[in-house]
Amino acid sequence: MAANKICWLQMKRHNDHFWSIADHLDKDSLLDGLSFSLKIADEIERIGEFNKVMDVIIEASMNNKMMTTVVFKSYKTLATWIVYCASHQTAEVCFPVLKKYGAALRPEDTSFLALQDLGAIAAAHSVRKFLKQRDFSQRPFRDSDSTLSLALEVANSILSMMETFGEESELANRFWPS
Amino acid sequence: LAKLDTELVNAKRELSTANEEYEGARPDHCYFGSIERNPEYFAAQRNKTSAESKVSRLRKSIHALEVQPPNVEMGLPKSKEIAFQWLFFLFMPPEFQQLCTMMHGSQKLLTNKTVAETSSMSLHAWFKSRKKSTSKPLSIQPAKILCTRSSEPRIGRPGIRSYVRETGIFFPDSLLLDPVWRDGDPFACFLDHDSTQIFTELLPSHIEGSAALQKFIPMLPSGTREKEAVAFQTDRPDWMSSDNFSAFAGLRAHPHTQFRSFVDAISLDRLPFDNPCVHVLIKQAMFHFGHESWKTDTTSKWNGLNVLFHELQ
């Protein structure tokens, strides 16, 4: 597929959307449903669409010497990172215990991005700031020990998990009465 | 089984008695035909045979009883702590599933290595086939699922005679929990060097010598890049002087002094600014000015653009 006008329009529309999410990171306004109603599932879907558009544009830019490919690669990466941050914040609201742990991504890795417009740079700033706030040594899903300790703490707070455990161990006791 | 055991002992005793009698009854000197005519000997022989068959019959029935019952495997570990860790991965809340998806996707964009898929035992599969309760669907398996790196356990069992009450009942507590990314671990193969390359523009291929110049574009700290330019003059394209070449090579060698090198190149006119390769080099440098404090952080005195602006004045 060639990168037609629609691709560029879509890129602009999606970028504006993601950058505005970045603007709300670490603020209550991200999830209060008033200024912004955010559903992570929808955003993940949107990321899928965006990635498709960006792949077309990246492909086209490689054959065009007037365009800088890294900028488009950076847009693609930035959008995913923004939604990651939003999803981390959502999980924190649902499971406050997550606040004790760090984020899996490192803030300094945003420096790889090659961005030229102010909107993108501001969004990258927000992402970096968000990750810096959560730059702890315990990084669940990145190292095994903190993953397991998070798993335990979260499961402890979920009633249905307790029920399942009770049910299973009761049925197990029939095999092993003690 | 215990009853049969006693019977076996008895039968063995009978057999040895019968054997002794048989041996005793056998005449010391046998003449041709005399054995057949000895009734004592015949009786002993019969006794011995029947005792033998009794022993072998008992052995068979004991063996039949010694068949071990199948193992009972439990779906969840016995320890509450470990079981809860399992449950988190089995019924992972959607918020964490989404978090994992995004985390995996984000990190994957920083590496161009294709991450190898991990083969390991699925916790889902274990639980599904062994759970005792029937309710509740399992969560879908996100990119991150909990597996144990160890393969299916081999459950050691003693012989049936040393069975105790809990023998043959297996709780998976001993399967070491080791969460792995099902779709490969992008964190494991992550290298700063690779990420730098991904976000480095390729030089236009139609320019003479651009392939050899490409290695000077990424911001990879190097103390020897400028010297490389001096040493490998054969890589220098005709549109560059040797001073141009060493300025080109050294511009991005030291991340924190890029702007200084850039100002240097401008004020001393050390680069052929009309060449597209130089455009790419400078553009790439502009993206990454002030590695730590971003270029829009104009409040910082050391901000790359501020210094550049100052110098150009």
Image (tube, rainbow, N blue to C red):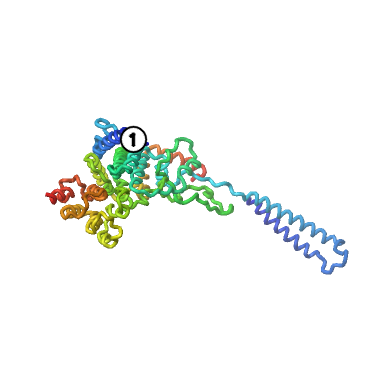
User: Where is mark 1, residue-wise?
Assistant: A46
- Judge left or right: residue B280 versus residue B171: left
Q: Farthest residue toward the left?
A: B313
Task: Identify the secondary structure beneath mark 1.
Answer: helix
Near-viewer residue (A59 or A173): A59
The correct choice, above or below, for A143 with respect to B93 in the image is below
Q: Residue at x 77, y 62 (%)?
A: B21
Q: Let me know if residue A88 appears in the view.
A: no
The kind of residue on which mark 1 rests is Arg
Measuring from the top left, give residue B33's x and y in whole percent.
Answer: 88, 64
Near-viewer residue (B71 or A4): A4
- Judge left or right: residue B238 versus residue B1: left
Measuring from the top left, give residue A178's x and y in whole percent.
Answer: 48, 46
Q: Let me know if residue A150 appears in the view.
A: yes
Measuring from the top left, give residue B230's x and y in whole percent.
Answer: 26, 61
Near-viewer residue (B255 or B263): B263
Quarter residue A64 falls in:
top left
Chain under numbered label 1: A
Q: Farthest residue toward the front?
A: B238
Q: Farthest residue toward the bottom?
A: B29
Q: Farthest residue toward the top?
A: A34
Q: Residue at x 14, y 48 (%)?
A: B309
The correct choice, above or below, for A12 with respect to B238 in the image is above
Measuring from the top left, give residue A166's x and y in whole percent.
Answer: 43, 40
The correct choice, above or below, for A10 with respect to A148 in the image is above
Near-viewer residue (A127 or B280): B280
Quarter residue B256 falls in:
bottom left
How many residues crowd around disc 1 within 10 Å: few (fewer than 14), some, or many (20 or more)? Answer: some
